[in-house]
Image (cartoon, coloured by chain):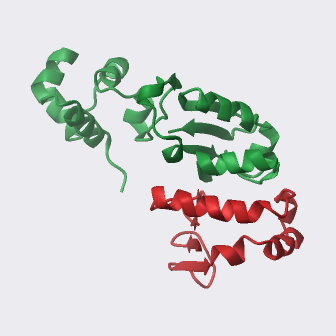
Chain colours: A green, B red
Amino acid sequence: MNKTFGERIAEKRKSKGYTQEQLAEMMGVSAQAVSKWENDISCPDVMTLPTLAQKLGCTVDELLTGRESAPQPTIVPEENRKPFEQMMLKIVVNSCDGDHVRVNLPLPLLKVFLNSEVDLTSFGVGNGTLNRLNIDWKAIMLLVEQGTIGKLVEVTSADGDVVEIVVE
Amino acid sequence: MMKITISTNNGSDTAIKGKDMVIRIPNFLALNNTALKIAKKQPGGQHIPDIPKEFLPKLRKAIRQVKKIHKNWVLVDVESADGEKVQVKL
């Protein structure tokens, strides 16, 4: 079951290790106000949402909808990288008519495809949206091998389909 | 084992409404050249790319290695707007 807005605030606050009093102080409100937010009795002022999201280490979208947004792309130094075998490439297609498709492709498997010259773009994922994007998978693999992780591609098509490619 | 789980808890008028249907096919049966030829002749088969003959054994081997690391790996997870779900595990 989806969490309420208040429950998400409480969860994020606890994961940051803040007390209600500490968050209240950061936001310039009373501890009772934070308590009311978390119990869905009242909501924070809309103008304070970006600050609240920043203090809780998430996005406004994540706070409002509960949908976790993929991390922005970053280059990880070689010594801190996950072993290649454990890395996963996720293709997320959210179609305009409300369908969601998620493909979890371990990178070693993607490499097998790339080495074989099988045409990945001809796979029909997400009502053909992925095909039309004509993604350069070799370029993506090169980026990953150089240590880039996070959301590498985000495309919104004219008819409203959204495609994200995330490497974790 | 290829495991396809179809959950039709919402919105479906099919005979399996409200139930989960699970189809299990051993990978060596699902991912072989004969199955590929048959699949390409089915509706939607045009989306399956041309795959070299020697590719599928390599793919099966890679899948075995991947599954040792990602124990609960779900290859494809689809949720339709009316709440029906399809999961494909290899």
The residue at 41%/34% (across/down) is A62
Residue A56: name its quadrant. Answer: top left
Q: Is residue A20 left or right of residue B67?
A: left
Q: On screen, B27 above or below A149? A: below
Camera sees residue B79: no
Q: Position of A140 compared to A47: left or right?
A: right
Which picture quadrant has residue B63? bottom right
Residue found at x 73% / y 38%: A137
Please indicate, yes or no, whether residue A85 appears anywhere in the rendered image: yes
Q: Residue at x 86, y 72 (%)?
A: B37
Is residue A60 shown above or below B70?
above
**Residue B25, image x and y in percent?**
63, 79
**Image side of residue B5 versus residue B33, left or right:** left
Residue placed most toward the observer, A161 or B59: B59
Classify B88 as above or below A128.
below
In the rendering, at what x and y percent does residue B90 appear? Answer: 59, 66
- Which residue does the image show at 65% across and 73% down from the upper left? B27
Q: Quadrant of the N terminus of chain B?
A: bottom right
Residue A18 vs residue B37, the one in the foreground: B37
Which residue appears farthest toward the bottom when viewing the image? B15
Q: Nearer the viewer, residue B57 or A134?
A: B57
**Left or right: A166 in relation to A115:** left
Q: Quadrant of residue A158?
A: top right
Q: How many marks?
A: 0
Percent across and percent down for residue A110 are: 66, 47
